[in-house]
Amino acid sequence: MVPTVLIAAVVGLALGVFLQKGRFCFVNAFRDFFAYEDSRVTKGVIAATLLTMVFWGIAYQFGYYQGFWTPQWGLTGLVGGFVFGIGMTYAGGCASGTLYRAGEGYLQFWLTLLFMGVGYAAFAVAFPTLENAYFEPLTFGEGVSLFTVTSIPAGLLALAIAGGGLLVYATLIGKSATTVPPEERSNAASVRLTVLLAPIAGLRQFWRGTFEYFRNLALAWRDPLASSKRPWDPRTAALGITGAAVLWFTQVSIIGVTGPEARWMGYLLSQAGVEAESYDYWGSVLFQGQGVDVTTDMVMIGFVIVGAFLAALWSGDFSVRVPKRRRLPNAVGGGLLMGAGSRLAPGCNIGNIYSGIAELSVHSFVAAVGIVAGVYVMTHWIYREVGCAL
Amino acid sequence: MPSIDDVTNTPDELSDDRADELLEEADLVQDMMGEMCPYPQVEAKKGLQKLESGDLLVQETDHVPCTENVPQAVGDDADAQVWRSGDATYRIYLRKR
């Protein structure tokens, strides 16, 4: 039996390295898509989520898993997610982005982390009131993962969803590749033919792209040292993150960031003499009455920072970066909104978009919509002078 | 672990000498040290709006993702090149089309 703390170290380091080298950023993924239709990182995020879903579905089907995270669902996901989405766009880094950028030496993101902590603490204090005034009226049902309620084998279900996603994607890229200007279309039949051929053309393009990717991957191995110092394709990050997530799922749980961070806050406060356990939110919700102590997932996210630090140092990307004074509101405000939003949802971009969708949690579908809506609104505000594409 | 720079949309890299030469002829230099995405993207777009076709805008940054995101953000408005110092500072050269 491998000690869990070792698994936490391996998974955390791997996540940190792949996030940093692939510049895997959820804010970038949605913000840049809305701002100027750049879908490069968006595709990486979707690929990682679908791949993880397939492997988690298979692991669940055969019983190799430790547990799902399925909070009760309702409008809390939408409201909290929206607040979180606003916060992460304003801060310039999501929950995972903040961690790896802290590791790259950005003092601004250490400040963001600090104020996320303030957000967690404020939430813990307000929790009894919020339970009656916010969670109860806005919660509609018990949390559930679709894997557990359908009669379709989980692995098959995941493959079907991923296959469906691929087909939609293939149709989209196929359409843009086979679109003929209207004046060149001879008749309606050729238009219909184009529509029918789009998925096939798209799939061929996808296959060529994938083949090209693996060929380049093989080429990169010829000079592993030089290759390792260059930035990596988001697809490499997606594959690496999936690997780490599968290991974590079979050994510990799904991947979360802000949950463990909120536990860190409780733990650090208790070390400073605050009776964190006497607050319901820390005592009975986050630490589930087990006592305020360092848990495995807390160790894991700590190692994400270490992994990102090592990767950045290796690539020559590490330096201590001092923020400009005019960006301090971004760190303070963004951090507070992320901390509070991730508790109100509950869950951050990793818990809800990456892990939550990969485990088909109903709550996370709602929360993901809220997060993306928040990014959309905030992107339009930040780009108000130069305009957004969407 | 392997890297696949060929498929990441990174702009062409400038040599140290060429980077310094070009910096001297820049029409607008933006200090983006310590700045986070998306502000360098927004500033680059604003800066290009002020420039004439053929003018050169240089951004100095210590934010790695900017070397990819800023050229992506300005799109067809400018041709992009990048210079990497090797110790976490970068310059992005945008020549307005």
Image (cartoon, coloured by chain):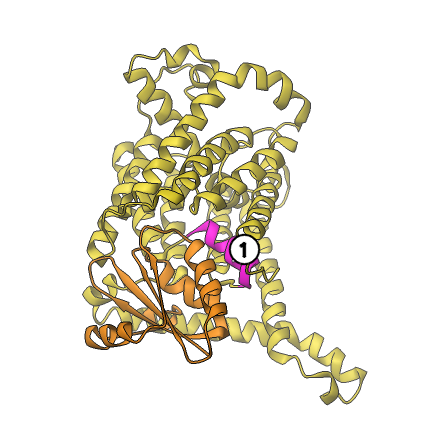
Chain colours: A yellow, B orange
- The one nearer the camera, A214 or A328, is A328
Determine which residue is flagged by label 1: A383
Please provide percent x and percent y for residue A197. Answer: 66, 77
In this rendered view, identify the residue nearer to me: B97 or A208.
B97
Q: Is residue A136 visible?
A: yes
Q: Name the chief secondary structure element in magenta.
A: helix
Q: Mark 1 falls on what kind of element? A: loop
Q: What residue do we see at 49% from left, 55% from top?
A: A29
- In percent of width and height, residue A300 lies at 32, 36
Residue A372 to residue B81: above or below: above
Q: What count of labels does the image hold?
A: 1
Residue A172 position (above or below residue A344): below
Disc 1: which chain?
A: A
Numbered range of the magenta stretch: A25-37
Which quadrant is home to the C terminus of chain A? bottom right
Q: Position of residue A214 (x, y in %)?
A: 37, 70
